[in-house]
Amino acid sequence: MEYFAAAYLIAGFVFFGYSFILSRKIKDLKNDIQELQIRIEENSS
Amino acid sequence: MNKPESFEENLDFREQEISFIYTHRIKLVVAVLVLVLAVGYLAFNAWDSAKVYYYTVAEIKEIGPTTEGQFVRVSGKLIEGSFERVQNTTLASFILTDGSETVQAIHQGIIPDLFFNEHSEIILEGRYTQDNIFESNNIIVKCPSKYIASSS
Amino acid sequence: MKNISISEIFWIFSFIFLITSLGIVFMWAPTDVNLGVSQKIFYLHLPTAILGMISIVIVAFLSILYLLNSENNKWDDLAYSFAEVGMIFLTIALISGSLWSKPAWGVWWTWEPKLTLTLALWFVYVAYLMMRSYMSDLRNEAKFGAIVALIGSIDAPLIYYATELWRSAHPGAVVGPNAEPGALDERMFLALILSFIAFSFMFIFFVSNRYFLRKTETRMNMMVRKLN
């Protein structure tokens, strides 16, 4: 195994993994906010 | 509509999480503190050997033989033509120099590729024996501090 | 036309620069005469290490801004985001460094000053993030974090000047104020600048996304606490 290939591959995986975690967290948060809005609207009506 | 319920569950979960952290706060802070102290102790020990990472050949000769269990590093350049390998073994012997002084060294094991590069500086990890021979356990090749394009 | 957000612009820029710099690094930049192809790790190792080091200084700076005006959570949220992304970049610098030191020096790891100090900085990031996730009061959390970041930020210049201050296995600095002139081939220098720009855009992209998330998380937590 060439060391430079391993280094670039691992770096790619780490960056990809981190952006995946971030995007999933942002999606969850958006869902939470949406549900909160629905709840507030229901309560106020 | 089941969306509001699922949010309520989430809310409960958050509340539980917060109360968990409240009740176990002291334990958690102690755990973090212990971890930080342990790492600090390890780092301090490592730093002790890191700050004088290696001796020059002249310095190791002045210090003299190492005591039992003590490991030191010595740095120098390989004298061309001094490298010899005991036949059919991985035992090698060679001489390092810092420009003026020289030291005889032996190494058991694999020799890295860049060892024989004339620009490389070599750092040996091991013991300096009573017979004034450096018994190396580990070879670290210090690269030349310039990056140069190969002509091809 | 669809609206393009700032974070999308950073993403597009980092993508374009990353592709270009990879092309430059592997197709155009010359191979090192001593280290051969393993020297290509340099274009990944150095930018990520520099960004990981700069990041702790930014965290410390933002923490001071927060301490001066603790009514405003903005600085603290930004500091947290820089710390998390900085740790990701420093982790890659350590891994790529280990994968380079094996073929270049002959060992995966050695306790030489620059490596020891970089590992210490990595633990500073770990301590910062762990401390913050274990404490429940936002103000206390931010204050303790600020102390850790301020102490940790001393480490960054020490890492840079390590080869000057102590005996080290690392080669001397090739960029910045401590660099020796002519230490780097001109084409290698251009490739390095390009990859540095690419990683910087990526860094800003991650920080801006993390900041958006952190800001909203902080607000949500405050709201939940008020509701209770």
Image: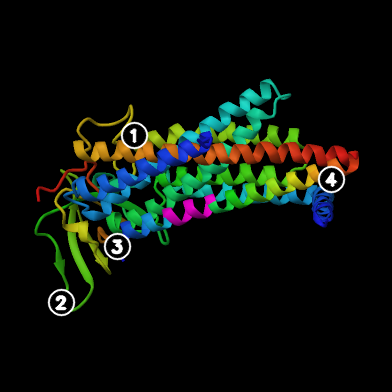
Residues tagged by mark 4 and mark 2 found on one chain of the structure: no
Q: CA distance from mark 1 to mark 2?
A: 42 Å
Q: Read off the magenta span.
A: A11-19
Query: Can you see residue C22?
Result: yes
Name the residue: 65% across, 47% down. C130
Residue at mark 1 shares a chain with residue at mark 4: no
Q: Which residue is mark 1?
A: C164
Q: Residue at x 53, y 51 (%)?
A: A18
Frontmost of labels 1 and 2 is: 1
Badge 1 marks a residue whose secondary structure is: helix
Q: Are marks 2 and 3 in contact (CB under 8 Å)?
A: no
Q: Amino acid at mark 2?
A: Gln
Closer to us: mark 4 or mark 3? Answer: 4
Frontmost residue, C129 versus B55? C129
In which chain is the residue bearing label 1? C
Which residue shows up at 25% across the image and 37% down it?
Answer: C189
**The numbered mark 3 sits on a residue in which chain?**
A
Marked residue chain, label 4: A
The disc placed on residue B87 is: 2
Residue placed under numbered mark 4 in the picture: A39
The secondary structure that dominates the magenta segment is helix
The residues tagged by marks 4 and 3 sit, at their Cα atoms, a distance apart of 56 Å
